[in-house]
Amino acid sequence: MEDIVADAQYQVRGSIVALEHPQFGELKMPTVQPRFSGTPSANQARARSGAHTDEVPGELAGLSAGQIAELRQAGTV
């Protein structure tokens, strides 16, 4: 991975971006592939593990706070 991040071709193509993570600082990661000229994409996501642990099962899947707590206790989330 270290070689890929340092590779000149990846850098010139913009295939590796640096994102700021609130806990780990700067992280270098691949951009979304493939990229098309008509639909340019920038890595704007500032994802962090667990950021949406309650939102996804609660708001999107319709689970109650109690159900989410059970999943958490079981080690599922």
Image (cartoon, helix red, strand yellow):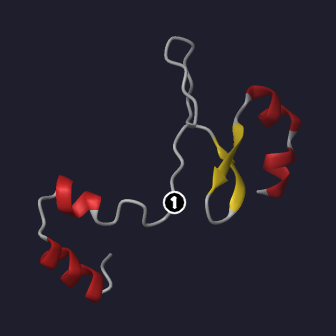
| Front residue of this view, candidates 77 and 38 | 77
Quick check: 77 above or below 15?
A: below
Q: Quadrant of the C terminus?
A: bottom left
> Which residue shows up at 56% across the image and 34% down it?
33
Give the number of callouts. 1
Extreme residue in the top direction? 38
> Which residue shows up at 78% across the image and 36% down it?
10
The reply to whether residue 74 is visible in this rendering is no
Q: Quadrant of the N terminus?
A: bottom right
Quick check: 64 above or below 72?
A: above
| Front residue of this view, candidates 65 and 73 | 65
The image quarter containing residue 51 is bottom left
Q: Position of residue 41 (x, y in %)?
A: 54, 26
The amino acid marked with disc number 1 is: Arg
Quick check: 61 above or below 12?
A: below
The image quarter containing residue 76 is bottom left
Number of residues whose C-alpha sits closer than 10 Å to that of mark 1, classed few (under 14), some (14–19) or many (20 or more): few
Q: Is residue 75 left or right of residue 18?
A: left
> Which residue shows up at 82% across the image and 56% down it?
2
Q: Is residue 35 left or right of residue 4?
A: left
Q: Is residue 37 left or right of residue 10?
A: left
Q: Which secondary structure, mark 1?
A: loop
Extreme residue in the bottom direction? 73
Q: Position of residue 61 (x, y in %)?
A: 16, 58
- Find disc 1 in the rendering and name its residue: 48
The reply to whether residue 30 is visible in this rendering is yes
Q: Is residue 57 left or right of residue 23?
A: left
Q: Position of residue 38 (x, y in %)?
A: 51, 11
> Which residue shows up at 19% across the image and 84% down it?
70
